[in-house]
Image: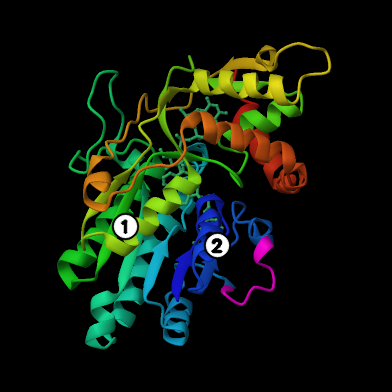
Amino acid sequence: MILVTGGAGFIGANFVLDWLAQSDEAVINLDKLTYAGNLENLASLQGDPRQVFVRGDIGDAALVGRLLAKHRPRAVVNFAAESHVDRSIHGPEDFIQTNIVGTFHLLEAVRAYWSGLADTEKNSFRFLHVSTDEVYGSLAKDDPAFSETHRYEPNSPYSASKAASDHLVRAYHHTYGLPVLTTNCSNNYGPYHFPEKLIPLMIVNALAGKPLPVYGDGQQVRDWLYVRDHCSAIRSVLAKGRLGEVYNVGGWNEKANLDIVHTICTLLDELRPRADGKSYREQIAFVTDRPGHDRRYAIDARKIERELGWKPAETFDTGIRKTVQWYLDNQGWVSHVQSGDYRNWVEKNYAGRA
Ligand code: NAD
Ligand code: DAU
């Protein structure tokens, strides 16, 4: 069996669902269920003995130690994190606590467990750390895409905390020999994406007749990857990645934010036209920029393709259409995640923006 952390969040839940759709190897899913964790994402696994869900914190080394001793997983895949840049600007502390201190305690518990394994199990054990392209900082328009050797230049409290966690993972390999793998992926999108992030926020606001808040001039560039392609990349790295190596994951899919919003409006105009016959583009509102906003991310994904033969299955056109359709088909999920906490966040992040 494998231990997945953060498996009730956006990417973690997609990973658990895909994993169990393709194999019968069981998953222990350790998740704190913060505002971003949602058991409804895993509803289709209810009663399925192949998933053992445990509510808990990766920073609770005693709990993690007990889970490892009891279930004896052959791998740990660490998704658990605070993940939203805007929240890290409003309040960085949780990011330091989970992404840095939490990863440290998790590594300590895993190191203790791994040290006690017999040689065969020890050699085949893996700790896979899921990280982000944001640790590399921001690119100018014509800079080459981030390779694995690009220097770390994180610019937000979120990316700085992820960078620190990447360094800890690296150090546990070099110092203790822990068999680690790290993936640094670009922006994901797809089902179960919490509507605080650009793509789901635009879809749910459009359908609710609310403004579509574009930060600054909307010309910041992100490199978008359909979430299930990220999951297949993680499975490849887990199965075939070289120990201690870093693999960048991306879809060669750079888009300016405003183009993303236009694409969503065009799809909604086709699939769920507004009652007044006007385009959803009418709802676009340019608002005050994010402080320290990174201008451009782009991933050079040649290493993972060359070494492991991984390539994304979706194009942006196919992935974004599936995503918009998923939100149209899952309005119940959308309304459940828009709790009181969600409304407080929207008020906090958007009320002060001109
Ligand atoms: P998310 O915010 O949707 O989910 C995070 C999950 O972790 C939630 O279920 C939450 O309850 C859980 N969690 C938070 N703190 C925890 C703790 N202390 N102990 C246990 N569980 C805890 O995040 P996501 O978008 O699914 O991202 C998952 C991982 O992938 C993160 O590490 C993130 O940095 C990384 N990543 C995300 C993207 C992206 O575009 N979303 C891209 C590259 C990398
Ligand atoms: O690059 C990978 C990262 O992508 C992950 O590590 C993060 O966990 C994930 O949240 C994401 O970070 P971003 O900051 O790029 O994603 P977000 O969806 O918050 O914003 C995408 C872009 O859209 C960014 O340039 C800011 C802009 N934006 C965002 C929001 C929420 C807007 O213009 N308006 C908005 O309301």
Q: Is the residue under label 1 in contact with that under label 2 (CB below 8 Å)?
A: no
* Residue 291 - label: none
* Residue type of the residue flagged with mark 1: Val
Quarter of the view holding residue 47: bottom right
Residue 104 point in image, percent of width and height: 34, 65
Q: Residues within 10 Å of mark 2 (few under 14, many from 20)?
A: few
Image position of 30 with respect to 117: above or below: above
**Measured from the top left, where is residue 75 in percent x and y?**
37, 71
Q: Quadrant of residue 327?
A: top right
- Front of the two marks 2 and 1: 2
In x, y percent, where is residue 154?
A: 31, 39
The residue that mark 2 highlights is 21
Direction from residue 131 to residue 300 in the image, left or right: left
Numbered range of the magenta stretch: 44-52
SS for callout 1: helix
Above-or-below relation of 39 to 189: below
Q: Which residue is mark 1?
A: 237
Q: Quadrant of the N terminus?
A: bottom left
Q: Is residue 164 left or right of residue 243?
A: right
Please tell me which residue is depicted at 75% across the width and 11% down the height of the picture.
Answer: 278
Q: Is residue 297 left or right of residue 60?
A: left
- Residue 172 at x, y = what percent? 23, 66
Quarter of the image with the C terminus is top right
